[in-house]
Amino acid sequence: MTPLLPVCILAGGLGTRLGQVVADTPKPLLEVAGAPFLRHQLRLLKAHGARRVVLCVGYLGERIEAALGDGADEGLELGYAYDGPDLRGTAGAIRGALDQLGDAFLVLYGDTYLRIDYTAVQATFVASGLPALMTVLRNEGRWDVSNVLLSDDGTRIEAYDKRVPTPAMKWIDYGLGVLSAEALDAAGPDEPDLAGAYHELARTGRLAAYEATERFYEIGTPEALAETDAFLRATPARPTPGRAQPG
């Protein structure tokens, strides 16, 4: 199995939509299917060849580090990048972790469980020669508001806009990306949101695409948490087959 690039997990959010269940527990440590959710996420990444994972933490981040330590019990090398006391946003959090991530890395959110071929995503990024890649899912309004316009050949994001989506947008950001260190400069050093960087990269033709075929699971709302719990109780972490890698 091809080793993955370092993986950045954005795990510093407040989880406000979950109410009191995150008052004393950071969202990534909520119990799901008998274990902290983040452990399910790490086991999935390990099954796909991950070796090093850097957690961008903020709210109750010290509890995440206390629970997971150096990652040896999951067969991974874990690092931590603390954001705060004033949270800098997703792009700002990644910038604070660049010294641990290197020149290129995968990035995802700490409340998502993504069944996708991570190795194929990485290979597509490398073959594209572009500074960043976004994974997308054909959505057409099923899970959330569609916010991505994909090129006709499916290799590039032509437009990405979370704030002002258009009727032509039939895909949604799947939640996994691959970034080079330079990609965050696309929207300028003061852009706090990763979505802002993606928007600018798409606008300038510098955002590659990879289309997922399996729906995503997440724990951002009580309903989604219950659905993900049921799914994980029935489904062990294992590599997800993907479409053919580029030659």
Image (cartoon, helix red, strand yellow):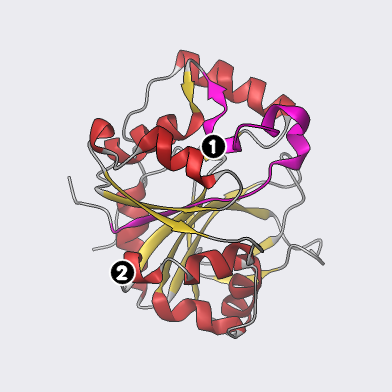
In this picture, which residue range is highlighted in magenta? Answer: 5-32
Q: Is residue 8 left or right of residue 69?
A: right
In the image, residue 80 sits, relative to residue 86, either above or below, namely above
Labelled pair 2, 1 in contact (Cβ < 8 Å): no
What residue type is disc 1 on? Pro
Going 63% across and 60% down the picture, which residue do you hit?
85
Q: Amino acid at mark 2?
A: Val
Q: Is residue 21 magenta?
A: yes
Q: Residues within 10 Å of mark 2 (few under 14, many from 20)?
A: some
- Left or right: where does residue 138 sit relative to residue 212? right
Q: Residue at x 31, y 69 (%)?
A: 126
User: Could you say which is closer to the camera, residue 39 or residue 173?
Assistant: 39
x 49%, y 66%: residue: 94
Give the x, y percent position of residue 142.
Answer: 73, 39
Neighbour class for label 1 at 10 Å: few (<14), some, many (≥20)? many
Query: Between residues 217 and 149, which one lies in front from this camera angle?
Result: 217
Rendered position, 176 above or below 72: below
Mark earlier in primary sequence (2, 1): 1
Which residue is labeled 2 in the image? 126
**Which mark is nearer the camera, 2 or 1?**
1
In the picture, the quarter occupied by the N terminus is top left
Mark 2 → mark 1, Cα distance in angstroms = 30 Å
Give coordinates of residue 97: x percent, y percent.
Answer: 42, 66
Up the image or down, 184 lies above or below 67; here it is: below
Q: Secondary structure at mark 2?
A: helix
Q: Secondary structure at mark 1?
A: helix
